[in-house]
């Protein structure tokens, strides 16, 4: 098992290239199950979660070729319909094969994904949406077993207690592409990753309207064909490096970032005093010497992304005054607080909110990562802290960031990987 070691206190300077979006790549790879023809997906980040999705496709009898950031899928006449526990248990996004398999095979067995360290993430909206299309669903021996021989289009409301669901929207949208009739998804997620999936499905011959809104309309077709598609770049990775620059007092250029995907983060960074400008797909970030506190509430897109909450908390730990972060997507997503406090932060959890009192500096310490975004937050804290920080269990980080320590090293950070 690896750990990351960081000697903090260095300002980041230079240029970083953003990789393809994992959260777009996973459902798009699942969507290749909707056809029997070859699909070519490019700009795919070589991450552990992507490798898991490829293993699931192969377990279903699909031939997959991987070459750098390009994945070619040959679905042909695959017969598999079971996504096994051994694979699904390692990655919650595996659930997005449910909709495509149901629509194409009319039968599917997908292991229940189980719990998560960032709090409960129920799949009730997935099952509600597919049931509304006419699927017969039951839970047997830890598996979702669904049969969809008599599915037809329907009007479906997909709102949950914490807003819309990206993967539930993706599952229902994919299933509806081959379901007779018209399906309307109300309170649909409109994250850039959902739009990217819809654009891929349109290339395959699907009929979809409104994918940039909270109401998506899908007219079922009899058949989808193969297609080529380039994944969008990762807005969460881009946001993480923007915050890393602000935290270290640096000045960097971020290539391959879409400003339309990062509006709320840019607004908050300007609020703390950071200078931000852009040209084309490059964002320029220049930090300020004195950070001002701001309040954050995480919400579905275009609100502040929950996947940047932990990283933003690190920045607020170093701002003068009191900041409040309220988590409206995953109210229990605060596992990183105790580790940040070990580094000298002053953060107190109150229900679904965190109250942060800024401190003059953080100090390096041995800490442990609990999940993907908490891992990134601890890396950012280590970059700014005085002394040495050692972060264990960084296999979480490898699920969502391509060679993060290498990119940070090129920006001037003193960071390296060791065996524990």
Image (cartoon, rainbow, N blue to C red):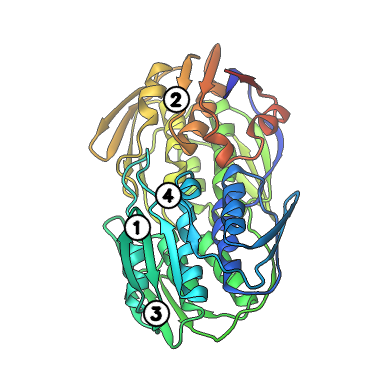
User: Circle 2: is it few (<14), some (14-19), or many (20+) Cα within 10 Å?
Assistant: many
At horizontal 60% and vertical 51% (from top left) the residue drawn is: 55
User: Circle 4: is it few (<14), some (14-19), or many (20+) Cα within 10 Å?
Assistant: many
Q: Whole-percent x and y of residue 401?
A: 60, 40
Tell me if I can see residue 173 in this picture.
no
At horizontal 54% and vertical 29% (from top left) the residue drawn is: 394
Label 1 – label 4 distance at C-alpha: 23 Å
Give the quadrant of residue 403.
Answer: top right
Vertical side of 313 occupied by 209: above or below: below
Q: Whole-percent x and y of residue 235?
A: 57, 50
Q: Whole-percent x and y of residue 236?
A: 54, 46
Tell me if I can see residue 345 in this picture.
yes
- Which dot, 3 or 2, sits closer to the camera? 3
Secondary structure type for disc 2: loop
The residue indicated by pointer 3 is 184
Q: Whole-percent x and y of residue 317?
A: 41, 26
Vertical side of 187 occupied by 260: above or below: above
- The image's mark for residue 176 is none
Q: Is residue 155 left or right of residue 100?
A: left
The residue indicated by pointer 1 is 123
- Which dot, 3 or 4, sits closer to the camera? 3
Do the residues bearing badges 1 and 4 touch, measured as CB atoms within 8 Å? Answer: no
- Which dot, 1 or 4, sits closer to the camera? 1
The residue indicated by pointer 4 is 304
The residue indicated by pointer 2 is 318
User: Circle 3: is it few (<14), some (14-19), or many (20+) Cα within 10 Å?
Assistant: many
User: Circle 1: is it few (<14), some (14-19), or many (20+) Cα within 10 Å?
Assistant: some
Do the residues bearing badges 3 and 4 touch, measured as CB atoms within 8 Å? Answer: no
Q: Earlier in the sequence, mark 1 or mark 4?
A: 1
């Amino acid at each position: 098992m690896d750990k990351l070691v960081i000697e903090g206190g260095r300002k980041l300077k230079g240029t970083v290239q953003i990789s393809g979006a994992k959260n777009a790549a996973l459902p798009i790879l699942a969507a290749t199950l909707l056809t029997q023809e070859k699909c070519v997906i490019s700009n795919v980040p070589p991450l552990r979660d992507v490798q898991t999705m490829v293993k699931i496709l192969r377990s279903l009898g699909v031939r997959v070729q991987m070459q750098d950031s390009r994945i070619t899928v040959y679905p042909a006449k695959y017969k598999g319909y079971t996504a096994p526990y051994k694979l699904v248990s390692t990655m919650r996004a595996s659930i997005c094969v449910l909709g495509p398999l149901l629509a194409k095979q009319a039968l599917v067995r997908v292991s229940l994904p189980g719990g998560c360290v960032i709090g409960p993430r129920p799949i009730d909206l997935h099952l509600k949406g597919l049931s509304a299309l006419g699927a017969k669903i039951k839970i047997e021996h830890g598996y979702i077993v669904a049969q969809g021989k008599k599915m037809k289009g329907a009007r479906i409301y997909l709102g949950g207690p914490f807003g819309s669901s990206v993967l539930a929207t993706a599952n229902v949208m994919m299933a509806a592409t081959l379901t007779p009739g018209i399906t309307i998804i109300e309170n649909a997620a409109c994250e850039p990753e959902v739009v990217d999936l819809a654009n891929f499905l349109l290339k395959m011959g699907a009929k979809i309207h409104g994918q940039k809104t909270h109401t998506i309309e899908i007219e079922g077709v009899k058949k989808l064909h193969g297609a080529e598609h380039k994944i969008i770049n990762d807005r969460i990775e881009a946001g993480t490096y923007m915050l890393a620059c602000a935290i270290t007092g640096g000045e960097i250029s971020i290539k391959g970032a879409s400003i339309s995907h990062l509006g709320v983060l840019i607004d908050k960074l300007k609020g703390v005093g950071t200078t931000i400008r852009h040209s084309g797909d490059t964002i320029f970030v220049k930090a300020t010497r004195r950070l001002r506190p701001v309040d954050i509430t995480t919400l579905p897109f275009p609100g502040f992304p929950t996947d940047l909450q932990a990283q933003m908390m690190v920045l607020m730990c170093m701002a003068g005054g009191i900041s409040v972060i309220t988590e409206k997507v995953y109210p229990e997503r605060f596992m990183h607080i105790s580790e940040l406090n070990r580094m000298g932060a002053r953060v107190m959890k109150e229900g679904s909110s965190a109250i942060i009192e800024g401190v003059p500096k953080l100090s390096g310490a041995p800490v442990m990562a609990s999940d993907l975004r908490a891992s990134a937050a601890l890396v950012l804290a280590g970059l700014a802290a005085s002394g040495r920080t050692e972060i264990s269990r960084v296999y979480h980080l490898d699920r969502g960031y391509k060679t993060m320590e290498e990119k940070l090293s090129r920006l001037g950070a003193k960071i390296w990987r060791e065996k524990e």
